[in-house]
Structures are given as structure tokens and as C-alpha cells.
Amino acid sequence: MRLNDVFLIAFTQLRANRFRAFFTLLGIMVSVAFLVAVIAIINGMNAYVSEQVAGSMIGKDVFQVRRGPISLGLIDDEMLLRIRKRPRITLRDAAVIREALPDAAAISLQSGWPTPLADIEWRDRLVGSATIFGVTADFQRVQDYTFESGQPLTDLDVRERRRVVVIGNDIATHLFDGVDPIGQSVRIKGQLFTVSGVVAPKGRVLGQSFDGFVLIPIPAFEALYGRRLTTTISVKVTDPATMPAAMNRAQEAMRLAHRLRPGEADDFTIETADALVAFWRKLTKTLFSIIPAVVAIGIVVGGVVIMNIMLMSVTERTREIGIRMAVGATRADIRRQFLAESVFVSVLGGVLGLSLGAVLAWLVSSLSPLPARVTPWSVGAALALGAGVGVLFGVYPAARAARLDPIDALRAE
């Protein structure tokens, strides 16, 4: 029997039993759709973090000197204890790095984790839970801020501990609707600060606004909140190609400033935006490790359904099998026919599942900022999975059909 005849018979059987065929396909289809959609969403999120989040939070031409790594939540207790014993990053450290990197585009110090939230009040208006950053003037250059009105914080504001603030666009919109915010006094934790500038909109990332912040000169910030346990130095280089050399020079300067001996471990961490991307990938790696188990359960269930339906089909078509053997069909022909039907059903379920998964990924991409992407390897995996399940769970029904005795099969009702 030719291969196309085999698949034609399989298709005819499916069409003759549409309702049964639907349930036969359902298990494979749902599992494959889940696999394709989840992989597409995770790939999209990885791309989004690499292209948008990391650049927005740190900057692609920026490295940071921190007390602890970005992946603080993934390190063990012993390492966390050692990090807590590290000295605080200070203005003096920032000055040391500035001296070591005179060609840097900007070097700033900013308050770090935990970043406080506070209510911002002006007259009878209030914006709740604004993010408060204590910064030096260069922070605004590191972040590439442009100003919608007013002026940025200056080195003089920092040196003289002035009570001035720069606010994000969301704060200005909600607090000063229709009023020029420049020169107005806002209240933060009961203290008055004068608005000196409003940053142009930065947009949203993963639905989170990047415009709900307030910048305060770091000495005034420390007077308000005390000395934060964690602070961060950000270094913006003039040429991304010089980043590795600049990081080495900053490391040497910090080791000298902290009087670390040769061979002694650094008591600080130097990281780029890549560390944030790596941190994210570690998180999604756990999710990736769970997906095969979830998909495997669905596939096994779908495969068992296919096997049972095929066994039922063998029973129902016993007389047909006997007639075919009587007119010359070999046991190999019978085996090949039922195996082809099983593969045809499971591959069709894989194709439908692939289409459904692509639609789900498209919906996620259309309705959210995530650029969900269906990758070629997930398409290949879906089709291979469908074919594999068809072979695996179709062997037994096909063998059972081929073992039927022709005489007994012809007597079957």
C-alpha cells in the first residue's frame, strides 16, 4: 500500500468520526498550544527585559558600583551575611572613582535599596507612594533625563544641602494640573522642598510608570531618611567599547580606597545592565524547567486518549481488517495503516495546537507591552512532539490489528 493511500484512509476515518476525532485531538492540541504560547511569552519577556527594562533602569553605556549584586534575592544566606558586613558605598567612594576615571561622561551616587515611597503634598492635593531617590547632580545625566520645564539639580544644590526637588512627569501632572510647578513648595514627610525642574515623560515598562519619582540632593535625602544601608555609584562612559577598561580602573580604585590586600575578595560589586538581564534569565530558567513536566503530563494524557480511541477503532473495524487480509493485504500493511492513522491524528493535533499557541502569543503581544515571539525551534518541537506521540501510542493498537486472525476477523459482527 502506498503511503498517500495510507494517509487518505486515515483522513477518511477522521472525517467519518468527527466528534470522536475532536476529542482525540484535544489533548495533544492543548498541550502543544500551551508549550508554544508559554515559550513565546517567555522569549518575549526576555527580549523586553534586555531591550527595555535593563536600559531604562541602568543604561546600556553605564556600569554600577554597588554594595551587593543585583541578584541579591538569589544568593545563599552565607553570601548575604558577608554582603551585609561590607562597608557602605559613600560620597568618598564616588570621588575616588571620579579621580580614577576623569574621562567618564558622568559619575553619580544615588540612594539604593530599599527605595522609600512617600506622599507628596501641595496645598490640598496629594500624590501617594512616589518613589524617592537621593542623588548627586550627575544622576540626571546618567539617566539621560531631558527636562520639560525648570532645571536639573546642580552640584551646588548637593553641596549646600538645599531643599529642592526634581519631579517626574506623573507627579507634576497629578499635583500641578494647570499650574506651573517650578518654584512651588511641596511637602515630603512634613518637610518643604522647592520644585526646581520637571523631567520629560519616560514612559511605562511592563505597565509600570517611570515618571512617578522625586529626586532630592543626597545630603537632604539623608537628613530626611537617615543614611541608607545601600547606595550605588553609576558611571556613564563616553564610549561603550571602553566599558571593560573603565570597570577595571574603577575596581582598582575601590580596592585601594578600601585598603584591600592582594588576593582579598572585593567588598563591593561592579555590574552592568547585563547583570540585570542575567538575573532575569535565572528567574525564567526555573519556569523553563517546569514547562516540560507540565507539557509531558498533557502529552501523556493525550497519547493515552489516542491509544484508547485507536484500540476502539480496531475493535469496530475488525471485519474490515479481515476483508482486507482476505484480498491480499499483509500484516505489515495493516500495521502501517493503523500506525499512520495514529501519527496523522497526533500531528494534526500538533499543527492545530501550534496555530492556537501562535494566536495566544499574538493576543498577548497585542494586548500587553510584551513582544511575545514564536521561535522556529518551538515550532519544530511542537511538530516533532505530535509525530512522536503518534508513533509511541499508536504502536500497540497497530500491532493488535496486525495480529488478528483473518478467519476470526471475517466472522466478527
Image (cartoon, helix red, strand yellow):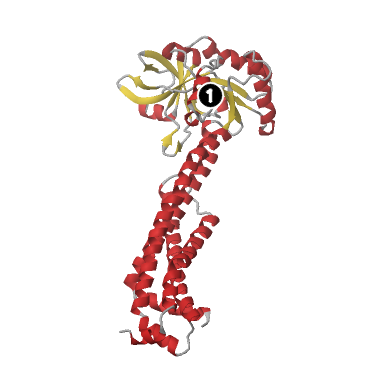
- Residue 376, by quadrant, is bottom right
Q: Secondary structure at mark 1?
A: loop
Please say whether residue 362 is visible from this viewpoint.
no
Residue drawn at (41%, 80%) of the image? 404
Residue drawn at (36%, 25%) of the image? 129
Please say whether residue 334 is visible from this viewpoint.
yes
Residue 57 image point, x, y percent = 51, 31
Farthest top residue? 160
Residue 322 image point, x, y percent = 40, 85
Number of numbered discs overlaid on the protein picture: 1
Tell me the quadrant of the picture where the C terminus can be found.
Answer: bottom left
Residue 247 lies left or right of residue 86; in this view the side is right
Residue 89 lies left or right of residue 252; in this view the side is left
Q: Is residue 190 above or below residue 382?
A: above
Residue 177 image point, x, y percent = 36, 28
Residue drawn at (40%, 54%) of the image? 297
Residue 140 lies left or right of residue 16; in this view the side is right
Residue 322 lies left or right of residue 271; in this view the side is left
Which is nearer the eye, 112 or 408?
Answer: 408
Residue 293 image point, x, y percent = 43, 50
Q: State the residue position of label 1.
A: 68
Which is nearer the eye, 266 or 231?
Answer: 266
Which is nearer the eye, 231 or 109?
Answer: 231
Amino acid type, callout 1? Gly
